[in-house]
Image (cartoon, rainbow, N blue to C red):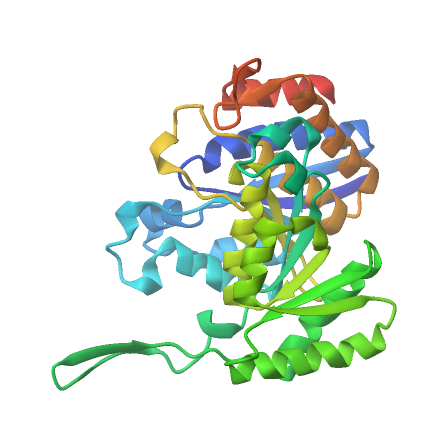
Amino acid sequence: MRNYKIVLLPGDGIGPEITAVAKNILNSISKKHGFQLTFEEHPFGGQAIENSGLPLPEKTLEACKGSDSVLLAAIGDPKFDVLEREKRPETGLLKLRAEMELFANLRPVKIIPALIEASTLKKEIIEGVDLIVVRELTGGIYFGKPKGRFKDNEDERAFNTMSYGSKEIDRISDIGFNLAKTRRRRLCSVDKANVLDVSQLWRDRVNYHAQIHSEVEVSHLYVDNAAMQLVKDPRQFDVILTGNLFGDILSDEAAMLTGSIGMLPSASIGEKGPGLFEPVHGSAPDIAGKDLANPIAMVLSAAMMLKIGLKEIEASNDLESTVNKVLSNGLRTSDLSSKGHRTLTCSEMGKYLLSEI
């Protein structure tokens, strides 16, 4: 029997609640499809800070590197904002991505017909939307050096450096173009080449890869126009390829096309080794421990893990179909509920998902 080692990082806030749902569902779906999952839970983020003073303990990092896949729930809490930046939960996440060499973040945005009324945009705008944002994850302004703060006479200044090398752009371009070939063969590269030298290099390298992958239709948009087009005509997009900063912003904007950021999964992958799979929402400390969280993004992240990380395609498709069936039956958590729907708690949603597997 196929056996996979999965590291679970419940993290902070609602993380433990949605992790418990995903773990139960993964145990059930793996038995149904004839493979076995072995789970290890490790502290990460604020949870780890409270235990050891570090957001990413060495033991957690080594466990992640030695796994077949990593499933992360959520990290962060305002109470940690008083810490110096290097000791905050978010710094632990950046370090984890860098140490595992996870340079590509994939964020799919697909409208579920049963939830089309949940979006703040008109039905005719979002109906049929099926896009994916491919974000470079370990370069750009979040990692560029030099950076810092200094005082110049009576003026205090801060600065960061946006920097990309051609090899960094080439490897994320490969991911984007190869993904486009499995979809509708359209790729839109987003940059700010009219004012940024780093974006000019980005566009040059993407155009180089466009010649190699001639079967993919390539377009370019400046990031401000891309942000506008995402809410004006999102159906025009298939694969959106962009850098770290722009991808961070655009992927969250795209997430809201669905009506709830609590619905969307993501994957962070590299050229080799295990991937990291996580919902795009935050830790929601205001509802932590109240059994109110929406676990579906975590469950769909588990489905992405099965498909991309473990190559268990049938199990992944089965899990996605299960989510669609439950939602089509009018079952919702409170973030999505409206008149005519039955509102469930986090744990109740987990039980209904299990009953459909």
Identify which residue, 290 or 274, lies in the foreground: 290
Number of labelled discs?
Answer: 0
Q: Residue at x 69, y 17 (%)?
A: 355
Which image quadrant for residue 269?
Answer: bottom right
Which image quadrant for residue 160?
Answer: bottom left
Taking the view exactly as shown, the residue that stands out farthest to the left is 154
Q: Quadrant of the N terminus?
A: top right
Q: Residue at x 23, y 81 (%)?
A: 150
Q: Quadrant of the C terminus?
A: top right
Residue 13, image x, y percentages: 40, 37
Residue 170, image x, y percentages: 70, 77
Q: Is residue 308 above or below residue 349?
A: below
Query: From this viewpoint, is residue 98 visible?
Result: no
Which image quadrant for residue 244?
Answer: bottom right
Q: Is residue 289 above or below residue 126?
A: above
Q: Is residue 36 left or right of residue 58?
A: right
Identify which residue, 201 or 234, lies in the foreground: 234
Identify which residue, 253 or 94, lies in the foreground: 253
Residue 4, image x, y percentages: 72, 44
Q: Is residue 218 above or below residue 5?
A: below
Taking the view exactly as shown, the residue that stands out farthest to the right is 215
Residue 9, image x, y percentages: 51, 44
Query: From this viewpoint, is residue 104 visible?
Result: yes
Q: Is residue 59 left or right of residue 155?
A: right
Q: Residue at x 68, y 53 (%)?
A: 132
Q: Residue at x 39, y 54 (%)?
A: 89
